[in-house]
């Protein structure tokens, strides 16, 4: 594959990705493509390499070997600006990583000013737009500790969206939330998916995968075991390991 891809190609291309931690191989030869506007949901048991794989896409983890292209840029090239890549790829984590001493509005505005070089007025205007988008504009002047977990996660999503990313990565965004708060976050993510945002989501929320995903990827022991449209993966799984996983997780 050429180092420069055309704009019409897949926006994320991962080829033969390996990641070692010492002698432990967390990701074992994973291939994945994500088209523009596509929603890929990655599922699998804990410790299967899902989060490590996701973190390699924006170089929070450096791959041991393999190739990654994001919007035509080859991440493995020495000359690739990591910060430039991260500005185009928003990431939402399990924990919200909000600054407790800043208001909600200031949290959403900060990175815009530093990375996107926006004026304070522009950054705050964009921040308010995104807080409206995730349904919590009335929380703008509060501090993170005054918000519920679900509200804090929506602030974290707004913060990423305010950077106008081309891609959003979600690493188990609801796993730290109380059950009644999960839906409000998933609803925001579902709206993003329906609006055409390119998304790669690691989650245990099978209902979201069924509703939003174009493709479901099942990982185990660092490998992609099975992949396909949600209805096929959930209703007609081929591999015994996936059948066992689904029998356990869909009971809940």
Image (cartoon, rainbow, N blue to C red):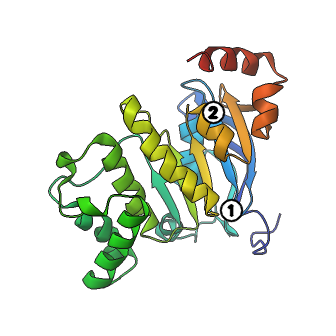
Q: Give residue 100's position: percent from left, percent from top.
A: 18, 52
Query: Quick one: SS at disc 1?
Result: loop
Q: Residues within 10 Å of mark 2 (few under 14, many from 20)?
A: many
Residue for point 79% across, 26% down: 235
Q: Residue at x 35, y 42 (%)?
A: 95
Which image quarter: residue 109? bottom left
Around disc 1, counting alpha carbons within 10 Å, would you say few (fewer than 14), some (14 to 19), or many (20 or more)?
some
First in sequence: mark 2 or mark 1? Answer: 1
| Distance between the alpha carbons at the discs numbered 2 and 1 | 20 Å
Q: Quadrant of residue 180?
A: top left
- Between 108 and 186, the one lying in front of the other is 186
State left or right for residue 249 relative to residue 10: left
**Depth-wise, is mark 2 or mark 1 nearer the camera?**
1
Give the residue pinned by disc 1: 37
The residue furthest left is 101
Mark carried by residue 43: 2
Residue 96 can be seen in this image? no
Which corner quadrant holds the N terminus? bottom right
- Is residue 216 visible in the rendered structure shown here? yes
- Residue 168 figure quarter: bottom right
In-front residue for pair 247/92 = 247
Whether residue 64 is situated above or below residue 87 in the rendered picture: above
Q: Position of residue 150 (x, y in %)?
A: 35, 43
* Vertical position of residue 68 compared to residue 21: above or below: below
Quadrant in the picture for the C terminus? top right
């Amino acid at each position: 594959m050429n180092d420069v891809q055309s704009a019409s190609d897949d926006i994320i291309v991962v080829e033969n990705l390996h990641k070692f931690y010492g002698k432990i191989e967390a990701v074992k030869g994973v291939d994945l493509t994500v088209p523009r506007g596509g929603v890929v949901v990655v599922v699998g048991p804990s410790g299967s390499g899902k989060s490590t794989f996701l973190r390699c896409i924006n170089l929070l983890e450096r791959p041991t070997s393999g190739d990654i292209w994001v919007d035509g840029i080859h991440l493995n090239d020495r000359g690739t600006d990591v910060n430039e890549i991260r500005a185009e790829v928003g990431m939402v984590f399990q924990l919200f990583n909000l600054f407790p001493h800043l208001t909600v509005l200031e949290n959403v505005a900060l990175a815009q000013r530093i990375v996107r070089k926006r004026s304070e007025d522009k950054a705050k205007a964009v921040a308010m737009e995104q807080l409206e988008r995730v349904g919590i504009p009335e929380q703008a002047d509060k501090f993170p500790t005054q918000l519920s977990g679900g509200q804090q996660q929506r602030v974290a999503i707004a913060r990423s969206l305010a950077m106008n990313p081309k891609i959003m990565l979600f690493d188990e965004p609801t796993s730290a939330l109380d059950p009644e708060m999960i839906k409000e976050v998933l609803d925001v993510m579902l709206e993003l998916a329906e609006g055409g945002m390119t998304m790669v989501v690691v989650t245990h929320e099978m209902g979201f995968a069924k509703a939003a995903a174009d493709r479901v990827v099942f990982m185990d022991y660092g490998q992609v075991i099975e992949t396909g449209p949600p209805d096929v993966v959930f209703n007609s799984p081929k591999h015994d390991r996936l059948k066992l996983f689904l029998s356990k997780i869909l009971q809940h």
